[in-house]
């Protein structure tokens, strides 16, 4: 079995979810497979989780391991309960071998699969699309996963290989997930778009615009994950009081949020707010933070410092020389792994666009409510550290405005939640009826 | 600029370290002040990134812009009505081109600088000139920028300019042999881009077909294409001598972004800084100055760019300084060699299923 099908316009029948034979299979399977939290899917995902965690080619990848952790049976059961299902399996037997007795609780809605979902995943190695794929499977959908022909990430390719192998083992090799690849031929995208019930489009914005310019079937649903801006907020005062253990913990967490996807994940902070007394007094804390972070990253030796220096030097020039739209920069602290660009005031949010690799815009504020300036539709996640209860509440309260989808503690910036970018993905990928 | 007039009167590689540093420092301090007052972008960049805006006491303290600044931005220090011409570079296909704003005085300085260097190696007499290219490069506006400008610049040192490629970029051997017969026994000048010279004048012509023992070859454009065929400067020179008896060959390194930075090969095959330009090798991570012999990013400094803030630029090329004031042929100044292009950052991130 070919792992990833190379689709040409004349070979669209290779997509198993569309082929007549498989449609029959699907009709036969419909009652079984087209179910929310089908045991077959859960067992498959749990098996996948175990295989991934012991796979030498994948297990050094924290992002994929996080997915593997998320799809463990115990976590999926927890989510199932959270979504309003009751566990009626009261005899205490080992769940692994028995079909569970989890049933929908007494609620006014019933959930079923939406149908066939077309997933368009990004070319680079951001792996969040694995969650939407997983959720779609749990909703009972059939799935087509378009993998960029430029995708060369060895960890992901190995994951796809393991998935294909296990789909076969679990007798789910037809219709559950089709991995396909084609050059960006509009005709193929159009053909598929006309046949599916939902499209999950992972950005950037130019990709989303391109895909959405291709009309889908009238009832097809588009779930798009566009470019976002995220930020971190630190208490400057608390930074000054940290001991070495505290620093180690903080730097690890910030590293995870900011550098796991080279600062280009949609939840990775592009702006850092230092909440303190005033700019002059907080300058020391900011400087110490930058120095500690730089040496922490240097000791990990994971980043190509030489190429990042040039990238950042060019970006500073761009930020300074942008015609008509100069950023209000008051100070620059240059460093190959960490560069701080301090802004006098917050510019139009569209101008906040890091080059990645540790290029942060910095703002100094003296009151948590000043974060209101960042309330914008484009803002996704605020990760916070060192705030007291009332400050935390003030930040939380900002979520209710037009922008800001998530407020989470530092270190959880990239932790996936099925409520993402304003969607409950389980609902979006389901057909909802009266219960 | 009076200092510059004096410098142009000297032989191009005459100034040794102490004299040169004094002249360069004086000139670069003036240029820094001038561009600070006339280019907002330069002023902001040097203030925010280099902090110090006072007078500099060492060449390495003078702020530098990244060379790509001219690709993404239109930077100039003269008013619009004084713009005489805008040079453009052709980068790799699909990339942004640099735009270099010249006024009349800076353009004249450029001519003088080139004149100083080229006549320094070929003498002041205009020589019959072969150009390893096609006249078609002038027909196409987009390619005129890079190759065309280079040919135009060098053409003033020759006469009876003869292009040896036809309109289809095929070698016109008849034209070439006619030219060589006509000037048999006389000094001639050959100019072309490195890979084209190799492709047409070397590969397509058999040994013994030509006698180029009286020729001076000047070529530029980089080694990337030839290095794929394992041809470096040493191989290039020894093969040309072996095949066509061509012994006088000068490679040079230059860039449209910095007027005056023309670094021509000395007798040891290293690129040599003329009186009015210098290089500093910087650590690619923290941009600190590397000692001689340590490789790093090449920063170029020149006393010529007044119309745009290009007097001090950090290039994307890697190189190493091989010596100073002690070249075998007696030339003064630093000499260096190019080690290739620096690597671009490859980041991961969320976006772009389609390549922009």
Image (cartoon, rainbow, N blue to C red):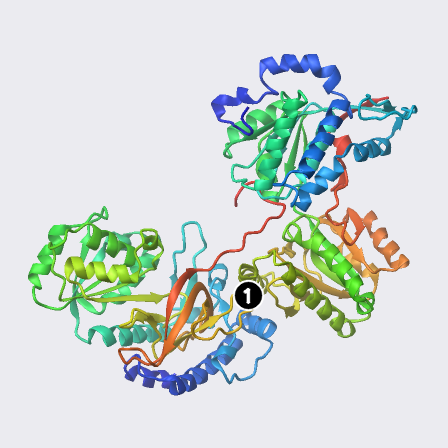
| B149 lies above or below A184 | below
Compared across the picture, whether A156 is left or right of B273 comes to right
- Residue placed most toward the observer, A228 or A104: A104
Q: From this view, report whether residue A416 is shown above or below residue B230.
A: above
Residue A238, picture quadrant: bottom right
Taking the image as drawn, is residue B309 in sight?
no
Q: Position of residue B100 (x, y in %)?
A: 42, 65
| Residue at screen point 42% across, 86% down | B22
Residue B51 in picture, x, y percent from top left? 60, 76
* Residue A133, x across and y down, in percent: 68, 32
Expressed as whole percent of the image width and height from the top left, the position of residue A169 reads 65, 23
In the image, residue B297 sits, relative to residue B5, either above or below, namely: above
Residue A30 visible in the shown view: yes
Q: Residue at x 77, y 46 (%)?
A: A405
Q: How many marks?
A: 1
Q: Nearer the viewer, residue A368 or B325?
A: B325
Q: Quadrant of residue B152?
A: bottom left
Q: Quadrant of residue B335?
A: bottom left
Chain designation of label 1: B
Return the residue at label 1. Answer: B285
The crowd level at tag 1 (other Cα within 10 Å; few <14, some 14-19, many 20+) is some
Asked whether, in this view, residue B64 is left or right of residue A326, the answer is left
Q: Is residue B108 left or right of residue A95?
A: left
Q: Residue A134 versus residue B135: which sits nearer the camera?
A: A134
Quarter of the image with the N terminus of chain B in it: bottom left
Q: Is residue A83 above or below residue A379?
A: above
Instruction: Tell whether B230 sits left or right of B340.
Output: left
């Amino acid at each position: 079995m070919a792992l990833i099908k190379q689709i040409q316009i004349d070979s669209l029948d290779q997509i198993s979810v569309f082929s007549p034979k498989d449609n029959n299979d699907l009709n036969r399977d419909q009652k079984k497979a087209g179910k929310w939290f089908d045991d077959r899917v859960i067992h498959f995902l749990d098996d996948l989780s175990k295989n991934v965690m012991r796979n030498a080619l994948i297990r050094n990848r924290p992002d994929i391991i996080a997915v593997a952790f998320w799809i463990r049976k115990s976590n999926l059961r927890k989510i199932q309960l959270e979504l309003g299902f009751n566990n009626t399996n009261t005899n205490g037997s080992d769940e692994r071998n028995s079909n569970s007795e989890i049933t929908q609780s007494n609620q006014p809605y019933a959930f079923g699969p939406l149908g066939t979902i077309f997933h368009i995943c990004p070319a680079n190695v951001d792996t969040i699309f694995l969650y939407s794929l997983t959720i779609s499977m749990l909703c009972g959908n059939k799935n087509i996963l378009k993998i960029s022909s430029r995708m060369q990430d060895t960890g992901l390719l190995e994951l796809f290989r393991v998935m294909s192998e296990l789909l076969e083992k679990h007798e789910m090799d037809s219709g559950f997930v089709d991995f396909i690849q084609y050059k960006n031929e509009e005709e193929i995208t159009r053909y598929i778009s006309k046949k599916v019930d939902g499209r999950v489009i992972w950005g950037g914005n130019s990709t989303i615009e391109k895909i959405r310019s291709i009309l889908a079937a009238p009832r097809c649903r588009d779930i798009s994950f566009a470019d976002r801006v995220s930020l971190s907020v630190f208490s400057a005062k608390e930074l000054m009081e940290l001991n070495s253990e505290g620093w180690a913990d903080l730097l690890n967490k910030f590293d995870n949020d900011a550098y796991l996807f080279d600062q280009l994940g949609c939840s990775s902070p592009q702006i850092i707010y230092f909440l303190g007394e005033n700019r002059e007094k907080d300058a020391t804390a900011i400087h110490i933070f930058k120095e500690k972070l730089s040496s922490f990253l240097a000791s990990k030796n994971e980043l190509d410092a030489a190429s990042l220096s040039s990238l950042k030097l060019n970006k500073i020039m761009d930020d300074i020389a942008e015609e008509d739209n100069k950023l209000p920069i008051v100070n620059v602290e240059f460093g190959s792994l960490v560069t701080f660009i301090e802004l006098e005031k917050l510019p139009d949010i569209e101008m906040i666009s890091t080059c990645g690799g540790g290029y942060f815009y910095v703002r100094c504020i003296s009151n948590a409510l000043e974060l209101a300036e960042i309330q914008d539709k484009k803002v996704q996640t605020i990760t916070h550290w060192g705030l007291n209860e009332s400050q935390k509440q003030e930040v939380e309260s900002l979520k209710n405005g037009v922008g800001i989808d998530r407020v989470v503690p530092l270190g959880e910036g990239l932790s996936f939640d099925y409520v993402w970018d304003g969607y409950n993905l389980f609902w979006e990928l389901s057909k909802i009826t009266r219960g | 600029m009076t200092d510059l007039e004096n410098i142009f009167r000297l032989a191009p590689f005459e100034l040794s370290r102490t004299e040169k540093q004094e002249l360069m420092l004086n000139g670069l301090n003036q240029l820094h002040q001038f561009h600070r007052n006339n280019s907002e972008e330069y002023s902001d960049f040097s203030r925010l990134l280099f902090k110090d805006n006072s007078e500099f006491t060492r060449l390495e303290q003078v702020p530098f812009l990244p060379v790509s600044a001219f690709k993404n931005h239109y930077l100039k220090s003269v008013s619009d009505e004084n713009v005489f011409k805008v040079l453009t570079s052709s980068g790799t296909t699909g990339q942004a081109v640099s735009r270099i704003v010249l006024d009349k005085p800076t353009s004249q300085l450029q001519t003088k600088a080139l004149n100083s260097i080229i006549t320094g190696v070929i003498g002041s007499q205009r020589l019959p000139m072969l150009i390893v290219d096609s006249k078609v490069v002038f027909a196409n506006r987009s390619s005129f920028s890079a190759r065309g400008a280079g040919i135009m610049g060098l053409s003033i040192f020759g006469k009876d300019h003869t292009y040896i490629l036809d309109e289809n970029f095929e070698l016109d051997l008849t034209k070439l042999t006619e030219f060589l017969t006509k000037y048999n026994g006389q000094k001639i000048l050959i100019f072309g881009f490195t890979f084209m010279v190799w492709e047409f004048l070397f590969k397509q012509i058999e040994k013994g077909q030509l006698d180029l023992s009286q020729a001076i070859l000047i070529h530029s454009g980089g080694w990337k294409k030839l290095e794929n065929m394992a041809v470096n400067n040493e191989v290039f020179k020894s093969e040309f001598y072996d095949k066509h008896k061509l012994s006088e060959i000068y490679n040079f390194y230059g860039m449209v972004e910095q007027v005056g930075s023309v670094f021509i090969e000395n007798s040891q095959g290293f690129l040599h800084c003329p009186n009015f330009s210098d290089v500093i090798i910087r650590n690619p991570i923290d941009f600190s100055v590397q000692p001689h012999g340590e490789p790093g990013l090449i920063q170029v400094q020149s006393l010529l760019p007044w119309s745009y803030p290009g007097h001090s630029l950090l290039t994307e090329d890697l190189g190493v300084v091989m010596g100073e004031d002690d070249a075998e042929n007696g030339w003064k100044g630093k000499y260096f060699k190019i080690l290739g292009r620096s690597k671009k950052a490859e980041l991961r991130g969320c976006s772009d299923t389609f390549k922009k």
